[in-house]
Image (cartoon, helix red, strand yellow):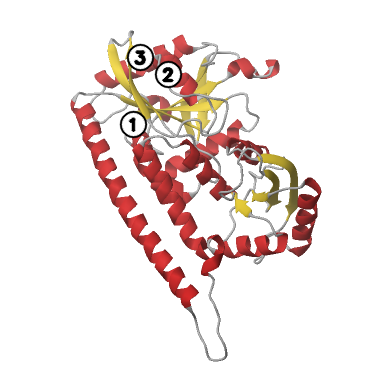
């Protein structure tokens, strides 16, 4: 995505490589959604199978030439890979295809950069992008390539400029990390204040576009931005939710959505945002029940929870969008139990948009909060249910 390109008109070829992994998206549906979210126009898709990525071109020379012909046929301005490319593979592909080549990681970073609104969110995106681009200096700044002289000459002004740019980026990364640490300390102070008030903290988590923000708005009557698109919400929003049956208010936070192959740089950079999930007393794990890949999405969310150290926090599964489910897939009851990573977890079926099941969800939350108040110190109200 060159700065001079209009994001709404960049015609893009989507490329996926099946390496035998179970989560391979043969139709490249999610990559297409990501591309459109970033303002790109996917005009064609191409996939191939390989036992392992080609070291130089990821897809091999034959498939690379096929992609080039397809791009010429559709007048594409960019090639987008569903997998992460090494700096060398990216550079080699651009030279062979004579077009900008980007990967899934860069695309997610671009979307986050477009959507970040808060000071913290912008800092997190800047850090992740700097860490990503720092390994791609030669590709991103072609004018910095080494300038060779005559026989016996080594290096040149270009090589010096690359080192200067690397030092500049390293300095900026250090400064951004320091600013994020300051924000993190502020959040810790706010959380300590909530803990002193005896607040019960609930975090909404889930795969992107599962309907977390819509559910958040429905529960607390807020106006957080919600849309049928990936990563509609980046910045954490926290509101008080009053549960009449428990005669108590709880703290409810809407967090950034998870996604398959979330770049590790983003997990590190968004640690301050994801800290809300780490410090929660209960995770409301929102699942798009109408999505045919919901089981895979649950696994992906569980994987991210493990990476941020939140895998042991009790969960309440909220299967959202029941109004969009096929008639033959509709649940027989509103509440039941479902096994997640070997743990029996309570599950409730709702439609945040249509208001279905929200009363049952509120009642379940009130029951959990009431049990938490009565439970001995150190015990959680869902512990007995999870062990059965």
Q: CA distance from mark 1 to mark 2?
A: 22 Å
Which mark is on residue 366? 3
Give the left or right position of residue 383, taking residue 352 as reference: left
| Quadrant of the image occupied by residue 314 | top left
Which mark is on residue 223? 2
13 or 212: nearer the viewer: 13
239 or 1: nearer the viewer: 1
Give the left or right position of residue 134, taking residue 123 as reference: right
Q: Position of residue 168 (x, y in %)?
A: 38, 62
91 or 23: nearer the viewer: 91
Q: CA distance from mark 1 to mark 3?
A: 16 Å
Q: Quick one: label 3, few (<14), some, or many (20+) residues within 10 Å?
A: many
Q: Secondary structure at mark 1?
A: loop
Name the residue located 69 percent from the left edge and 52 percent from the top edge.
Answer: 17
Residue bearing the label numbered 1 = 280
Q: Earlier in the sequence, mark 1 or mark 2?
A: 2
């Amino acid at each position: 995505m060159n700065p001079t390109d209009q994001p709404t008109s960049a015609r893009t070829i989507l490329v996926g490589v099946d390496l035998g992994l179970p989560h391979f998206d043969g139709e490249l549906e999610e990559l297409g959604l990501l591309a459109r979210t970033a303002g790109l126009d996917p005009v064609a898709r191409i996939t191939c199978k390989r036992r392992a990525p080609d070291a130089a071109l990821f897809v091999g020379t034959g498939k690379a030439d096929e992609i080039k012909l397809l791009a010429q046929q559709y007048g594409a301005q960019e090639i987008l890979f569903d997998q992460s490319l090494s700096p060398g593979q990216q550079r080699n592909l651009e030279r062979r295809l004579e077009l900008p080549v980007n990967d899934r990681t860069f695309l997610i970073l671009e979307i986050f950069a477009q959507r970040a609104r808060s000071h913290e969110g912008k800092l997190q995106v800047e850090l992740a992008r700097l860490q990503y681009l720092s390994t791609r200096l030669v590709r991103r700044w072609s004018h910095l390539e080494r300038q060779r002289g005559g026989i016996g000459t080594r290096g040149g002004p270009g090589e010096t400029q690359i080192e200067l740019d690397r030092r500049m980026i390293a300095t900026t990364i250090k400064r951004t990390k320091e600013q994020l640490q300051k924000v993190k300390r502020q959040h810790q102070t706010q959380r300590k204040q909530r803990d002193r008030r005896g607040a019960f903290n609930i975090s909404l988590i889930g795969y992107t576009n599962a309907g977390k923000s819509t559910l958040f708005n429905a529960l607390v009557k807020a106006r957080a931005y919600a849309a049928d698109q990936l990563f509609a919400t980046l910045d954490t929003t926290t509101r008080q939710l009053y549960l009449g049956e428990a005669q108590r208010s709880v703290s409810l936070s809407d967090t950034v959505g998870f996604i398959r192959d979330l770049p590790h740089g983003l997990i590190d950079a968004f640690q301050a945002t994801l800290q809300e999930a780490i410090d929660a007393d209960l995770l409301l794990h929102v699942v798009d029940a109408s999505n045919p890949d919901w089981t895979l999405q649950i696994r992906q969310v569980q994987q991210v929870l493990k990476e941020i150290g939140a895998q042991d926090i009790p969960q309440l599964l909220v299967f959202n969008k029941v109004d969009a489910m096929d008639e033959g897939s509709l649940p027989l009851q509103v509440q039941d139990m479902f096994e997640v990573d070997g743990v029996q977890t309570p599950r409730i079926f709702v439609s945040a948009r249509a208001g279905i099941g929200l009363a049952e969800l509120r009642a379940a939350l009130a029951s959990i909060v009431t049990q938490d108040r009565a439970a001995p110190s150190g015990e959680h109200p869902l512990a007995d249910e999870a062990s059965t």
